Amino acid sequence: MQFFTDVYNILTQYWQYLLKGVGITMLIALVGTVAGLLIGLIIGVIRTVPESKSKFVRVLQKVINTIFAIYIEIFRGTPMMVQAMVIYWGYAFATGGSTLPLLTSGIFIVSINTGAYMSEIVRGGIISIDKGQFEAAQSIGMGHVQTMVYVIIPQVIRNILPSISNEFVINIKDTSVLNVIGVTELYYYAGVIKKMNLQIFETYLVVCVLYFILTFGISKLLRLCEKKLEGSKNYVICGSQSDPDAEIHVKVVEHHVHD
């Protein structure tokens, strides 16, 4: 059938373009997600700092929290495509025509966009941790930052891992909007290929399948990582003389030994 022949020809003739597009797409999505997570962690920690007794520090906290709130609302409330245009061409406007490198621009745009979402995810994760753990850490002399780094954040990361995975998958797809400023990711190369072969449907179908393979494969891989972190669902209780399950286990073991 001619259709399948055309698809095969696209894969064999333009595989280098497709492979390069996949590589850049994954690079931007991965770095953008990691950078966004770091932004989210920093903002989450700062926004959960207890209110200071000093009036000056309280005012400073309110100003900083207001700035963060504005940043979050703007980047969550506007499309990434528009953000890309405003940031890229806004920089050119401010510098009299100079532009940032496209790959750097793409990573920066995805990072700050992801950071806005991650900030709220992290803040929700911190709030969900039992207050007793904060009090216990403070009772042994830990400050807010130490409590966050050594006690709270490790638990938060584990709790929000599904959300982080989801953001990564979303970023793989959302990199396609960066073609509006000329970033040469997978969708950009689809446009290049279809102009060369004039096979619009076949070309975009191939790219659609590639996006699906990337997102589906990453989703399954990350889900596997989540299961590994969860640990085994069946535990053998040892070292307890009061737990009936432990006593039963010991008796079973002794029974097998005597047999």
Image (cartoon, grey):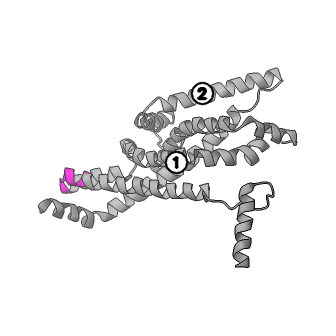
Element class at badge 1: helix
Q: Which residue lies at the image location 61% right of the left edge and 59% below the top edge?
A: 232
Residue 96 visible within the image? no
Q: Which residue lies at the image location 51% right of the left edge and 53% below the top edge?
A: 30
Q: CA distance from mark 1 to mark 2?
A: 20 Å
Element class at badge 2: helix
Whether residue 20 sits left or right of residue 253 in the image: it is left
Q: Amino acid at mark 2?
A: Ala
Q: Position of residue 67 (x, y in %)?
A: 62, 27
Q: Compared with residue 218, is residue 73 higher up or lower down, i.e. above or below?
A: above
| Residue 116 falls in image quadrant | top right
Q: Which residue lies at the image location 44% right of the left edge and 45% below the top edge?
A: 170
| Span shown in magenta | 197-204
Asked if the stretch drawn in magenta spans residue 151, the answer is: no
Sequence-earlier tag: 1 or 2: 1
Q: Which residue is mark 1?
A: 32
Closer-to-camera residue (211/127): 127
Q: Position of residue 109 (x, y in %)?
A: 49, 41
In the image, which disc is placed on residue 169?
Answer: none
In the image, which disc is placed on residue 69?
Answer: 2
Q: Position of residue 178 (x, y in %)?
A: 40, 44
Overall secondary structure of the magenta section = helix
Q: Amino acid at mark 1?
A: Gly
